Image: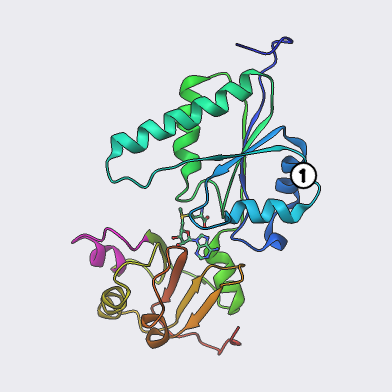
């Protein structure tokens, strides 16, 4: 059912940045204050990162709704959940409510938002959508160490570290700097793969960036010892920095 005045709500995908509320953009804050309903993925931990950033805004009066997203291996189960979550949002849009889906980092980088967006557009092709970018976790991590991500002709590869297959080491050969997301599984093997692929410069590690349990590490040995943490990433540089950078 469409709202009485026949107006559809607008849908916003909002990146909240990696966790520090200071890294939320002014545009994202303005939209979060303006919408009627804010959806976010239900937290894996006690409190969702995106939810924590929105709480810090203080004056956001939107209704808040958590959506379940299964981590099931079976694609059919995941798809079913995307469709069901999309239907929940579409119901609100049809009532004329402006809705946001808030997510950590940037909404278009390894995010549930992209799956959800496809389903919403399939159900409601006429909906107006605005995606508001967020600062990505890797940008926060390099900034803490004042480490240039890439310079001059260097190339950057962003890739998940889980589910590595036989093509993984070939992929690494092309890059001067790597951003490895989702690094919790088999980190010691991962570190030795990086060293074999010729990464002999900088290694940075960040877990739970912007949160109380934040863990920042530099150097391969320190990173190998880090406890398992889903919300963690590694930056690896092939060559050492020309000039030393301040430690965080
Ligand atoms: C589902 S992806 C989300 C990526 C996110 N859209 C971004 O732009 O950074 C989850 C992965 O992002 C990284 N990540 C996101 N936020 C993080 C944070 N605050 N601290 C450490 N890693 C983070 C980790 O590699 C984690 O496994």
Residue 180, located in which quarter of the rendered image? Answer: bottom left
Extreme-front residue of the structure: 46
Residue 223, located in which quarter of the rendered image? Answer: bottom left
- Label 1 sits on a secondary structure element that is loop
Q: Which residue is mark 1?
A: 60
Between 160 and 236, the one lying in front of the other is: 160
Residue 40 location in percent, x, y?
57, 43
Residue 85 location in percent, x, y?
49, 32
Q: Is residue 211 above or below residue 7?
A: below
Q: Do we see residue 120 in this rendering?
A: no
Q: Quadrant of the C terminus?
A: bottom right
Residue 189 location in percent, x, y?
26, 75
Question: Bounds of the magenta span?
Answer: 160-172
Q: Do we see residue 115 in this rendering?
A: yes
Q: Is residue 54 magenta?
A: no
* Picture residue at 49% right of the left edge, 85% below the top: 241
* Picture residue at 31% right of the left edge, 61% below the top: 162
Residue 157 location in percent, x, y?
40, 62
Does any atom of ligand 1 lie closer than 8 Å to the CB of label 1? no
* Picture residue at 47% right of the left edge, 63% below the top: 231
* Picture residue at 51% right of the left edge, 58% below the top: 45
Q: Is residue 170 magenta?
A: yes
Between 195 and 114, the one lying in front of the other is: 114
């Amino acid at each position: 059912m469409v709202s009485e005045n026949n107006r559809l709500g607008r849908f916003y995908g909002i990146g909240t940045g990696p966790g520090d509320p200071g890294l939320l953009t002014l545009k994202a804050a303005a939209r979060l204050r303006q919408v009627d309903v804010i959806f976010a993925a239900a937290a894996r931990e006690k409190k969702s990162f995106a939810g924590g950033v929105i709480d810090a805004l203080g004056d956001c009066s939107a209704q808040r709704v958590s959506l379940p997203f299964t981590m099931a291996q079976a694609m059919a189960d995941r798809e079913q959940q995307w469709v069901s979550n999309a239907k929940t949002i579409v119901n609100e849009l049809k009532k004329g409510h402006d809705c946001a889906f808030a997510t950590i980092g940037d909404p278009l980088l390894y995010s549930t938002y992209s799956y959800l967006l496809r389903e919403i557009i399939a159900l409601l092709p006429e909906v107006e959508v605005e995606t508001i970018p967020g600062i990505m976790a890797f940008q926060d991590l390099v900034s803490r160490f004042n480490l240039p991500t890439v310079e001059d002709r260097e190339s950057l590869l962003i890739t998940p570290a889980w589910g590595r297959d036989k093509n993984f080491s070939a992929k690494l050969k092309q890059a001067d700097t790597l951003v490895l997301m989702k690094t919790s599984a088999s980190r010691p093997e991962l570190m030795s793969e990086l060293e074999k692929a010729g990464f002999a410069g900088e290694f940075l590690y960040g877990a739970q960036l912007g949160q109380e349990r934040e863990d920042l590490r530099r150097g391969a040995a320190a990173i190998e010892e880090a406890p398992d943490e889903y919300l963690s990433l590694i930056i690896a540089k092939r060559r050492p920095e020309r000039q030393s950078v301040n430690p965080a």
